[in-house]
Image: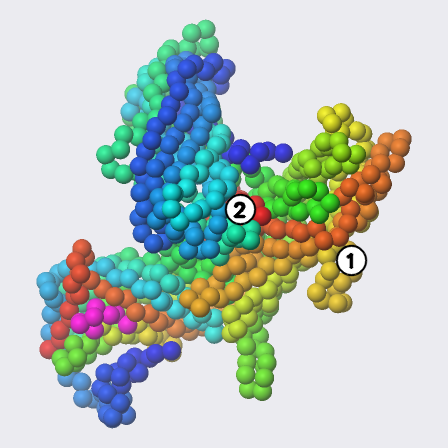
Amino acid sequence: MRGRGAVAVTTVVLAGIVPGADVALGDQQVSTELAYSCAFPGGARTVKVGVGARFPDRAAAGAAIRPAEVSTSVTLPDAAVAELTKLRAARTGATTRLTTEVAQNGATAQALWQGAAPSVPLAATGGATLKATGEVSTITANSPGDLTMTAAALTLDFSPVTAEGAATDPATLSVTCTLTPGESALLAKVPVTTAGSSPTPTPSTSATDPPTGGPRQPSPSAPNVVPPKTQGAPPATAPACRGDTTNPLALAAYTTGYSNVSKMAEASLIPVFCAKVVQGPSQLKRIEVRPGVFELHLLQTSVGRLDHQGRAQTPPGPATLLTFGFMPTTATMTLEETGPMIIDSDLNNTAGHGETYIRIPLTLRISDVKVNGTPLDVGPNCRTNGSLYSDDPVPAKNTKDHVVLLGRLKKGTDTVWRGYSLSRGGPLDGSVTIPPFTGCGVGEDLSPLFTASVSGPANTVKQNQGAPCASGIPDDPAKLCTPDKQPTNVPLPLR
Amino acid sequence: MRSTLGKLALVCGAATAAFALATAPAMAASPTNWVIGPGSPESFTATSSNVVLSVNGIDMTCTYSDAGGSLQSATGNPAAVGSIDPVHFGRSGEPCTSFLGAVDTVANTPWTLNVTDYDAGSGISQGYISGINARVSVATCAFTVTGTAHGTYTNATGDLAIATNATELTVSDPTAGCSGVVSAGDHPSFNGDFFAVVSGTGTHPTIVGS
C-alpha cells in the first residue's frame, strides 16, 4: 500500500529534456520560514509556513532533480485554531498543497508540492503546528543555467474531528493562502551544468512528447517549458478512477476510511478506492405526513461498482494488526465486491434531513501474510465465507449478505445543509459482522486461525466519500473532475 | 417568500396597503431622470448572507454571496442605472447548499440594474435586474436560469432586496441528471438582500428618481 504521506509525483519538464539518470544528492539543505495570509471563513489569518527540503547542490542538464525529505510545517495562530474549534473540532489533520514556481533562463513552470500532516490536538491558546511530509515533483532541465524554485500559493485542506472522534460539520475546511507581500520565497537555487558524459541534449527539439493543452513559452531562445504532464491528476494515494464520459448520469468518486476490527487493537485503513456510480432516477414526492401536512422528499436509487484497475474491489491494503499467537503479523486485506452497490436516498426537504443507505456485498480477502516477518502461505483463496454483513434497518432487506453504510444529511438552523449526500460526499457509517474465513492455507487449514483472530460482530466502519466527478456532463464549476474525468477530491480517512 | 408588491405595501404602510397595491402603477409618477450618488459613475460592491434560489419547492441557500459592478446616472423609464459584474454565489468553505448537497452556480454576467419607480419619502426605488443568466450545478444535474428579478433598493441602508415575481425566471437546458427534479420551463424564485457600498468605502450608493 502507498503511505498516507505519498503524493502525486508530477514531472516538471523543462523542454528539450532527455530522460537521464538521477543526480546524486548533494548537501543543499533548505529550511525557510514564510508568512502566508490564509482566507479562513472568519477572515484572513497569518500562518507561518516552514518549508524544508534537500536539493542537489548542482545538477547536470538532462538529469532529474529530485527534492528529498520535503516537509511543510504550518503553524496556526489562535485565531485560526478558533475557526476549527468553532466547528467543534478537538483535533485536525491536513493536506498541504504548495505551488512552487520553477524557473530557468527566463522560462517558468509550476510544480505542486503536496503533503499530508497527521492529526494534532487543538487548544484555545498556544496555536497548533501541523507537520506535513510528502513526495514532490521531479524537475529536469535540459540546458545549463541556474534553476530556481520559489514558493507561491498554498492551499490547506483541514480534516477536523470532534473530541468524540467524529467528523465535524462540515467534514473538511479548505483555505487558500497567499504569500505576505515582501516575503522572499526562494526555496532553492540549483546550478545546472552541461551534461558531462550523458547524451547531448538537443535544445531546440523536445525529446518528450509534448503534452496536450500546455502553454509553451514563445521565446525561441529560451527552453520551452511544458507544465507537469500529470497536472490535475489525482494524488498517487488515489488509484485511477476515470468516469464514464458517455453517460450523463455517471459519477466517479473516491472513498477511504477505517474499518475498526473489534478483535484487533486498532482500526485498519481502507485505502482510497474508486467507486463508479450511475445516478438513478430522481423522484420528487410530496408525502402527506398528517392530514393536510405535506413533506417534500427526493427519492433516488443509484447503482454503483467499485473499480480498482478494472476489478470490483478496493486496492489491497495492509493489515498490520492481526495478532494471533501474540506474534506480530502483517497481511494484505482486500474488499471484493460480489454484487452491485445500491445507493438509496430519501432526502426530506421539509423536515431538513436526509438519509442515504449504501448496500454492498463485500468479501474480505487476505493475502501476503507474514508472521513475525516470516511469510505464511495462505494460498490464493483465503477469504470470508460470504459477504461481510450489517443489520439492515429494512426488515425485508435484512438478508445478512451485504454491508450497510448510512450517510446522514441535516439542515442546520443556519439553513446550511451538512453531512452526506451522494452528490457531494461526506461521512458514511456502518457496523459489520465479519463471517468465518475459508480457503486459507496450503496443505494445512489456516482458516480457523483467521476466523479466531478476525471474524465476529460489531466491527465499526467509518468511510469518507469525496465529492464525485460528474464525468458525463460538461458542467464542472467546482472543478471536481480532472481533464480526463477523474475525481479531484481525494477524501481523508475519518476516525 | 416576499414579493415586490409585498415590499411596496410595506413601504406604503399597512393602512393604505390595499389602495397602494391596486393603484400604485397608475399613480406612479414614472420618473425619467435618475441620479446616482454620491458620484456618478461609481463602482460598488455588495454582499449577502442569505440568498435563496428555490425551484419546485427545493431551496438552494447561500449564506454568502457577493457582487460588484458600476452605477451611473441615466434617463428614461425604465432606466439602466447599473451593471452588475461579477456575481458569486457561495465561496470556498462556504458553498451554497440544498438537500441535494452543495450547489455551485456560475453567474454569466453582466446583469443590468433597471429602475422604474421612486418614492422620495422613503428613498426606495423599484426596479428589476435584467439579463440574468446563471448555470446551477449539483453533481449530474446542471441547468440554466435566465430572466429578470424584481426588487427594491433602499438608499438609507444600501439594501438591494431581490424578490422575484412568480414566472420571471425560467429554467432551460437541464442535463439528464435533473430529470424528476428540475425541468425546462420551470420557474425558480430568487430572494435575497444584498447590501451595497461604494467600492472601498462604507458609504451606500443612492438612486434618486424624478
Q: Along the line of sight, which residue is nearer the eye, A225 or A30?
A: A30
For label 1, the residue is A400
Task: Provide the residue span drawn in magenta.
Answer: B154-161
Residue A369 visible at all: no
- Marked residue chain, label 1: A
- Which chain is mark 2 on? A
Quarter of the figure that contains the N terminus of chain A: top right
For marks 1 and 2, the one nearer the N-term is 1
Q: Is residue A138 left or right of residue A2?
A: left
What residue appears at the point 41 percent right and 41 percent down from the top-left corner?
A128
Q: Where is residue A451 drawn, in percent x and y?
A: 81, 43
Residue placed under numbered mark 2 in the picture: A491
Element on which disc 1 rests: loop
Residue A298 seen: yes
Q: Quadrant of residue A395?
A: bottom right
Q: Are marks 1 and 2 in contact (CB under 8 Å)?
A: no
Is residue A458 positioned above or below A180 on the image?
Answer: below
Q: Position of residue B148 (x, y in %)?
A: 32, 71
Mark 2 surroundings: few (<14), some (14-19) or many (≥20) residues within 10 A: many
- Residue closer to the observer: A335 or A104: A335
**Which amino acid is tagged 2?**
Pro
Query: How is the protein colored in the picture?
Result: rainbow
